[in-house]
Structure formats: structure tokens, C-alpha cells
Amino acid sequence: MLFLIKKLVGSFVIYPGLSVTFGVLALLLWFKRRKLAFFFAALSVAFLYFFSTEFGKDLTLKPLEDAYPYPKLSSLNCTYIVVLGGGIVPHSPAAGGRATVRPQVAKRLLEAWKLWRVLKKPIVATGGVLYPNVESEAAVMARFLEGLGVPASQIKVEGKSRTTFENAEFTYRLIGPQSICLVTSAYHMPRSVRIFKSFGFKVTPVPTDYRVNRAGYNWLSFMPIYGVDTYFGFREWVGIAFFELRNLWRAREDSNLRPTD
């Protein structure tokens, strides 16, 4: 239940749900505070438009993607390759009615496969059950990896987690605090590294699935067609903020428990 409440509330405090929140405020204020209602209505439209453009998308994602450079794979050294899930398509016609991975997860798995070919280290696929009566995301990911030629004996399946924090928690229960090469989307890496390190993992980031325009802008950059990527960026910034606040709160509680002279 807490998981669902967090998802519901969180969707209205980040893009694009925050535009809906501004719109609702405008409606509630329309009859008593007309000027303030106009302000929130204009803010809703401006916020929705700007962050749907390529400029808004890149402003949100670039600091996240640039946090960790892409490494030279042959120089890496780790005990396990851990690849994080990010969604599946249940009952996909293209997969004969079975579940298949979403495009961003396919990119992560291809990166893990590239790394496995170089290091020959076991891969941990992590992701739980997202839909009723559908296999875990990690099981779908494992099938994808096997299709690329990774032996089943080289794949460990962690099929309980639903969040990045749970990815780290259940991976810790599966393999312990090992040295890992962590594979996920570049925008998702800063939060993932923080969380996995908090469980005692020695983390080597291997980012993939880059989304920022690094070539230059054109007229299409002004079109409001980039909202999905912006949503991912906002979600990461909010997730990082909550993780840091959680750590500060725990540190404060720990300091209050220490005996005083």
C-alpha cells in the first residue's frame, strides 16, 4: 500500500503531473483570487511546454548523464555485473504472447552483454513482479540475455524488487556486498550508485541509454515531444533528494541516540 501511495503522490509533484497540480490550483482559485488563478494557469502551460521541448529535457538530464563517464570496458574489474530493470511489456504479440523488455531495458541488457563478453563475470538481473499473473522482470531479462548467448549458469535472477532501493536490498541478500559493475541508464546512475554504495557494494558505474542531444539543436527542438525523457529526469532528481533527506534524518536519529557526557 505504501508503494502505491508513494507512486500516486509522487506523480503529481514531478513533471508532467505538476502541471496538473498547477491547473487544479488555478481552478480552485478562479472565483476568489482571479489574478493568482491566472498565474497558476500560465505557470501550468509554460512549465508543461518548456519541459516538453528538447531544451527542457536536456536541462533536466544532462547533469545526471554527465555524473559518470563511460568507461573503457577492458579496464574494469568486478566480481559481478549487476543490471537494473526498468519495465516490461506483458503479453507482447512480438514475443508470442510472453512478456518482453522495454527498449530502455534492452539497452541496459545489451550493455551488460558487451561487458560480459569482455569480463566473463556472472550477471545479476534485478527486477520484480510488475503485473498480476506475469513472470518477474528479472526472469524476462534473463531470457533476453540467454537469447544473446549468455549461459543460464552465468545469470542470477533477483525477482522480488520493485524500486531501485529494493534492487540494491535484494541484490545484497543474493550476493552480499560484492564488487560490482553496475549497468543502468546514464540518467539513472547517480541515484543507483548512491543506493548501492549505502548497502556496502563497491560500485563501478557502467552507464548506457544516453538521451541528451550532444550534436546541436534545430527547429524540432522547440516541439513539445520530449516529455517522457523529462519525466525520467524529474523522477531521478526527486529520488536523489529523498534519498539524501532520508540519510540526513537517519544521521540525526543516530546522533540523538549517542550517550552524552
Image (cartoon, helix red, strand yellow):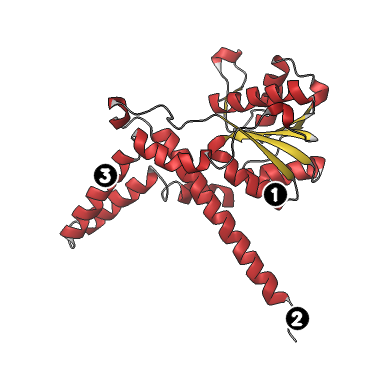
Mark 2 against mark 1, which lies toward the viewer?
1
* Pointer 1 residue: 197
Residue 224 screen position, x and y as percent: 31, 32
Give the number of callouts. 3
Measure the alpha-carbon separation of dots 2 and 1. Answer: 28 Å
Measure the alpha-carbon separation of dots 2 and 3. Answer: 52 Å
Residue at left 21%, top 56%? 37
Query: Is residue 112 visible in the rendered structure shown here?
Result: yes
Q: Which of marks 1 and 3 is nearer the N terminus?
A: 3
Q: Quadrant of residue 149?
A: top right
* Pointer 3 residue: 46
Q: Earlier in the sequence, mark 2 or mark 1?
A: 1
Mark 3 lies on a secondary structure that is: helix
The tag on residue 259 is: 2
Residue 211 screen position, x and y as percent: 47, 31
Residue at left 56%, top 18%? 92
For badge 2, the amino acid type reads Pro
